[in-house]
Image (spheres, grey):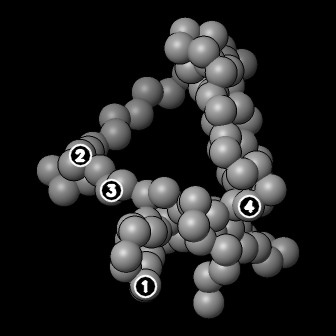
Amino acid sequence: MANDQNEQQQMTIELGEKEAEGIYSNLAIISHSPAEFVVDFTRILPGVPKARVHARIVMTPQHAKLLLHALADNIGKYENQYGEINVDGQHNPFPPGVTNIN
């Protein structure tokens, strides 16, 4: 039985045709409650006064923290290979030219 617990389970992940195309996002809005984190992915384009949410991901706080660690790990690997990612306007979480979202 202990041997069975140590064996890794394999999982197949299916990627649908629509999802395989991906969705471009240049803004993520994050909110949370005691039970969940909500990440809304949107894109803001020059000259377009309104943006809409293209995808909403809801996850537990534990999965949000695992995502944080996975992103940090992958950003580190990316920067080791391609160089440091420069972030303009580090104090403004919005893309250039955007100061507020209502």
Q: Residue 50: which disc?
A: 1
Question: Which residue is located at x 34 percent, y 40 percent?
Answer: 13
Disc number at residue 23? 3
Q: Nearer the viewer, mark 2 or mark 3?
A: 3
First-in-chain label (1 vs 2)? 2
Judged from the image, the secondary structure of the residue bearing numbered disc 1 is: loop
Locate residue 10 relative to residue 80 in the image: left or right. Answer: left
Report the amino acid beneath label 3: Ile
Q: Earlier in the sequence, mark 2 or mark 4?
A: 2
Mark 2 touching mark 4, by CB under 8 A?
A: no
Q: Nearer the viewer, residue 97 or 83?
A: 97
Do callouts 1 and 2 mark residues in contact (Cβ within 8 Å)? Answer: no
Per the model, the C-alpha gap separating discs 1 and 2 is: 26 Å
Find disc 2 in the rendering and name its residue: 20
SS for callout 2: helix
Which of the 4 image quarters holds residue 102?
A: bottom right
Q: Amino acid at mark 4?
A: Asn
Dot 3: element? loop
Q: Which of disc 4 and disc 3 is earlier in sequence?
A: 3
Q: Which residue ends up furthest to the bottom in the rendered image?
A: 102
For the residues labelled 3 and 1, the Cα–Cα distance comes to 17 Å
Judge depth for marks 3 and 4 and give the one in front.
4
From the image, state whether disc 1 or disc 2 is nearer to you: 1
Q: Amino acid at mark 1?
A: Lys
